[in-house]
Amino acid sequence: MMYSFAFFLQTSSISTAKCSTEQLEGVKVGDHNINNLRYADDTVHIADSQEKQQNVLTIVTIESEKKGLQLNAKKTECMIISKQLLMSVCNSLCKGERIKQVRTFKYLGFTITSDPRCDTETQKRVGLTKDTFIKMKSIFTTEIEDSTPKSIL
């Protein structure tokens, strides 16, 4: 347990690191700058341009190495989320290796896709809800004895 907490502190300090006096930029949500999402040992870095994303990746790589951690370029993935139908190419590099570009990935059970719509996730959840109601069908179709409502009251 102590190892997990120490790892969280290390990755937290890496994610909030500053390069010179420039803070890592992400995307604006209301008044907040969101540049990463962290859960356990998973981290998602967010940027609104290719240049900012490469900057974040470079800073995270450098700061990780300062703390004795290595960023695995083979396990690192890049996704460009865009309304445009034509898919942009991710040219990000980590230690000289090109980062694998993906169209979908799962984060905490939620499927994130390269188009900004949530159709896949919505369909998945509607399907799960339908399956649950089918399994509960007997609750809605079983006849209740005449004495049951009286005992509840």
Image: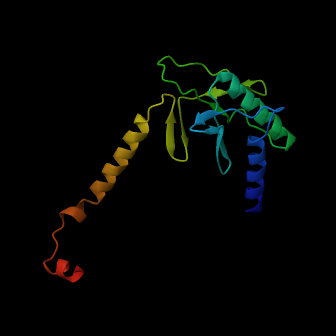
Q: Is residue 120 above or below residue 84?
A: below
Q: Residue at x 82, y 38 (%)?
A: 63
Q: Residue at x 78, y 33 (%)?
A: 59
Left or right of residue 116, residue 51 in this image: right
Q: Quadrant of residue 93?
A: top right
Q: Nearer the viewer, residue 92 or 13?
A: 13
- Residue 71 location (% of width, % of height): 76, 37
Left or right of residue 104, residue 143 in this image: left
Q: Is residue 146 above or below residue 42?
A: below
Left or right of residue 124, residue 148 in this image: left
Number of labelled discs? 0
**Residue most extreme to the left:** 146
Q: Nearer the viewer, residue 111 or 17?
A: 17
**Residue most extreme to the front:** 31
Q: Quadrant of residue 46?
A: top right
- Residue 56 location (% of width, % of height): 73, 31
- Residue 131 location (% of width, % of height): 32, 51
- Colouring style: rainbow
Is the N terminus in the top left, top right, bottom left or bottom right quadrant? bottom right
Left or right of residue 128, residue 60 in this image: right
Q: Is residue 84 above or below residue 140?
A: above
- Residue 33 location (% of width, % of height): 64, 37
Q: Residue at x 82, y 34 (%)?
A: 62
Is the C terminus in the top left, top right, bottom left or bottom right quadrant? bottom left
Q: Residue at x 33, y 55 (%)?
A: 132
**Residue most extreme to the top:** 86
